[in-house]
Image (tube, grey):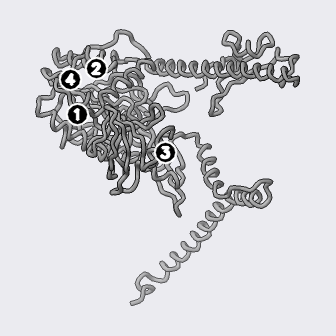
Amino acid sequence: MTLKRIIGPSLLFMLGATLLIQLPIAIAGRASVYEWFDPIVDVRRILVDRYVEPIEDEELPTAMINAMLEQLEDPYTQYIPASDTAEFNKQLRGVYAGIGAEVNIKDGFLVIVTPMDDSPSLHAGVMAGDVVLEIEGESTFEQPVSWCVERLTGEVGTPVTIRVRHLDDTEEEIVIVRRRITTRTVKGLRRRGEEWNYCVDEGLGLFYIRVTQFNADTVIELETALADLVPSGMNGLILDLRDNPGGGLPTAVQMADLFLEEGKIVEVQPRIGESVTYRANRAGTMPGFEMLVLVNGSSASASEIVAGALQENGRAKVLGTRTFGKGSVQEVRALSYGGGTLKYTTAHYYLPSGRNLNRNPDAESWGVDPDPGFLVPVTDEAFFDAFRARREFEIIRVPEDEYEACVSPDWVRENLKDEPLALAVEALQGRLQTGAWSAVTDEEQDPALIAFNQELERALKRRASYIEQLHATEERIEELQALAESHGDEPLLPEDLDLVEGTITLHDRDGNLIGTYQIEGGDVRLALDTVSLVPVMQDGESDFVDE
């Protein structure tokens, strides 16, 4: 029996008619796409054929793609050229092939800050503080970090030879076999040899864990750490997500689910299609110990999902400052024919309460706020002091014979210079001792106002730095004019130039406007002095802030 006899002539006619209708529509749609490219093709042809200088034709596609993405005004949508794809994938997955060491430049040479956990460099005998004098016979002196890293990384299983000077001034040539390195993202309070110590208060069963980013192995690392702590009688946990830029959505959901028996974790709302809601499952949930989450203005994306889910489900208190507000979902797609990679935004995150995590222009609400009484602002100076102090306790060294396993809030303040962590310890200690949470600050402050003021302070500091550079430039101009005059040449800037009605416009290195100022007194140097800078009013507002 033929297909025609099975379905009937009338149905065949309908199918044929449908195809005849759809085919012109498809052709028209394809034609409109080609028409969109017509001006671009014409411009490219004209420039290649007729422009006064030779055109680097291979760079035009990248320039065109970047121009399209700039129109979106979305900092998270990016094009990664094929030449940078390997480095991008390394950063995205936290996996690369190398020797496994944190490095820096000091006194012109490459220095090992610390070998990494279970790394080839650690097993080969590389120690914190070692000066890397040579890599494969080439000196590292006055070479940039990127140059050194490029030579230390390579194919899995290949050797690299380095010459180091140890802290005792002895020199040694070390051969290290490269292997795949996975960045560890779960850390403790301080090191004891290779091991992390998580103990804060042994008597109360209070522990501390810091998560530095979210990658494919983060939840496994966290579960491994908790598997050792929970049986020891853990009653309280400080989860530190400060300065954590985030990572994959699945990892964030898994981490939140680890501490939640039930409840909504996050909702993802795309532009096209239906929203997706992720909820907690009872299976595999950790015991209900008390929790406090530390966040700051650099806690973003997956960090905000975890902190917001634990807070809004009543599972944990949040201490610190308002988070960054990176509540958008990106997908990564490799382009055809080796054309690089496109990372683009597809959706936004929403907390269980319905709050949009993403910070939009002129938004008053974004991210995750600390609980009332737990807003703890930190100055930039205090932040850098704490960062430098903490780094000293992350270095892998030979274990000390005398070692106190747990710490006190005073120890945290004195050694880690970390006031928010000290307050978190005191708050959780109070909760475990009395059964109640006590506020760590008395004054009621607006988290948005704190964020605005910190940004304003940084903007003012940048402006002062730019003005200082302008002063130095003006002084150099005067010196050069004097030298020119001493040789009988005319000065570059006529002395009688009228600048009384002039203005000075300041931009940062990215071209963003900082401010426009009138010149008073007809003197450029006076105009550069902060007391002589008069903001030009536009629409009734002073142009003092560049954000």
Q: Which quadrant: the C terminus? A: top right
Secondary structure at badge 4 equals: strand
Observer-side mark, 2 or 3, equals 3
Q: Amino acid at mark 3?
A: Trp
Give the class, few, some or many, for how many residues have Cα within 10 Å of label 1's Cα (few <14, many ≥20). Answer: some
Secondary structure at badge 1 equals: loop
Secondary structure at badge 2 equals: helix
Residue 147 image label: 3
In the displayed structure, 229 sits above or below 135; it is above
Q: Are marks 2 and 1 in contact (CB under 8 Å)?
A: no
Percent x, y of residue 304: 37, 33
Give the camera-side residue of 77 and 7.
77
Q: Are marks 4 and 1 in contact (CB under 8 Å)?
A: no
The residue at the point 72 percent across, 18 percent down is 475
Give the class, few, some or many, for how many residues have Cα within 10 Å of label 3's Cα (few <14, many ≥20). Answer: few
Instruction: Please name the residue that numbered disc 1 is placed on.
Output: 193
Instruction: Please name the residue that numbered disc 2 is placed on.
Output: 424
